[in-house]
Amino acid sequence: MVKSLLLAASVILFGAAPAINPGSAAWQPSEPSATGVTGQGNPVKATAESQAKAKKLYNMDCALCHGESGDGKTDLAKDMQLTLSDLTDPKSLADQSDAVIFDVIRKGKDKMPPEEPARAKDDDIWNLVIYVRSLSKGGGAAAGSGSK
Ligand code: HEC
């Protein structure tokens, strides 16, 4: 706890450092901050643990529409007459950035409900992004076969 507070404090300090000399023309953003959601790249790194968690979340909150495999061929999708892309097809998400997919999951889209912050923190969503991308690679990223 104390340790994580210290870590958070140092991240804040580190993140604020460039603001100390905002007038410096030489200053350029070098690397994205460790925790910062830059709006572009995915700030989390998939681990077996994070992907196992993402898989669980996916199976609870997403699979009812998208299917465990991600192919979107579910009864609910049929009943709701949803037009779902086949997430097992690498082409489906190929031209969408992680940030765009993050937004779809966080905010929802048309008939897709938003994933509330109470259910999934930002990091959980970023891991879901990695997870849904992994569905086109045989499923489950580091979380096993996903063939269930
Ligand atoms: C009630 C059914 C439903 C649930 C639950 C649901 N989705 Fe969706 N999802 C949709 C629909 C419908 C779309 C298509 C939205 C559109 O583009 O009009 C969609 C689109 C998407 C897309 C974009 C696909 C593309 O080709 O653009 C992703 C990624 C996605 N969902 C992931 C998820 C994840 C992850 C969850 C769980 C947190 C989830 N969905 C939960 C119905 C659902």
Image (cartoon, grey):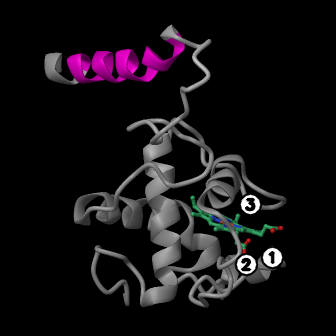
Q: Amino acid at mark 2?
A: Ala
Q: Are the two marked residues, 1 and 2, in contact with CB atoms closer than 8 angstroms?
A: yes
User: In the image, is residue 88 above or below residue 43?
Assistant: below
Question: Which residue is labeled 1 in the image?
Answer: 82
Q: Residue at x 16, y 16 (%)?
A: 2
Q: Please say if 125 is above or below 70.
A: above
What's the mark number on residue 112?
Answer: 3
User: Which residue in the structure is indicated by mark 2?
Assistant: 77
Which residues fall within the magenta stretch? 5-19
Reply yes or no: does residue 10 show up in magenta.
Answer: yes
Pick the quarter of the image with the N terminus: top left
Identify the residue shown where x is 55% and y is 37%. 117
Secondary element under disc 1, as helix, strand or loop, is loop
Kind of residue at disc 3: Met
Q: Is mark 3 within 8 Å of ligand 1?
A: yes
* Element carrying mark 2: helix
Quadrant of picture, ligand 1: bottom right
Instruction: Give the mark, 2 or 3, whose residue is nearer the N terminus.
Output: 2
